[in-house]
């Protein structure tokens, strides 16, 4: 349950990072620019942007998970 929740919460950020990385790598391959730092700035900007938009979703998902875990602890187990 915990791993599924974490994957669901992190999926948008990971997908954007993967997509931006692939696009930048494709552009680098086409133009033969092999600058390693070129990939970091667009990824950081894209990740920050998607975090701003998905933070309420992530917060809600992780809050529900923590509520469930605390309820299980109080009830004495699974």
Image (spheres, grey):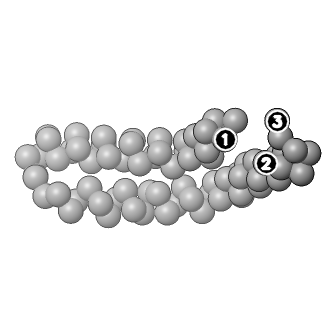
Marks 1/3: CA distance? 13 Å
**Labelled disc at residue 11:** none
> What label sits on residue 78 in the rendered view?
3
Gap in angstroms between the C-alphas marked 2 and 3: 10 Å
Residues 66 and 72: in front is 72
Name which residue lies at 39% across and 62% down.
44
State the residue position of label 2: 69
Is disc 3 surrounded by few (<14), some (14 to 19) or many (20+) residues within 10 Å?
few
Q: Earlier in the sequence, mark 1 or mark 2?
A: 1
Residue 67 appears in the rendering: no
Side of 50 where 32 appears, left or right? left
Q: Earlier in the sequence, mark 1 or mark 3?
A: 1
Do labels 1 and 3 touch, CB within 8 Å?
no
Q: Position of residue 22 (x, y in %)?
A: 30, 40
| Picture quadrant where residue 52 is located | bottom right
Quadrant location of the N terminus in the rendered image: top right
- Residue depicted at x 71% and y 52%: 62
Which mark identifies residue 2?
A: 1
Residue drawn 17% across the image and 47% down it: 28
Q: Residue 9 versus residue 36: which sits nearer the camera?
A: 9
Percent position (x, y) of residue 50? 54, 55
| Front-lying residue, 31 or 17 | 17
Single out the mark in the foreground, 1 or 3: 3
Q: Secondary structure at mark 1?
A: helix
51, above or below 15, in the image:
below
Residue 7 at least partly seen? yes
Tell me whether circle 1 and circle 2 mark residues in contact (CB < 8 Å): yes
10 up-or-down from 39: above or below: above
Indicate the quadrant where residue 45 lies: bottom left
């Amino acid at each position: 349950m915990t791993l599924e929740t974490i994957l669901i919460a992190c999926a948008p950020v990971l997908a954007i990072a993967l997509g931006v990385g692939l696009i930048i790598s494709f552009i680098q391959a086409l133009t033969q620019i092999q600058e390693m730092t070129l990939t970091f700035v667009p990824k950081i900007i894209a990740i920050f942007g998607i975090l701003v938009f998905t933070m309420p979703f992530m917060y809600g998902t992780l809050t529900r998970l923590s509520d469930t875990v605390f309820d299980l602890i109080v009830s004495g187990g699974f």
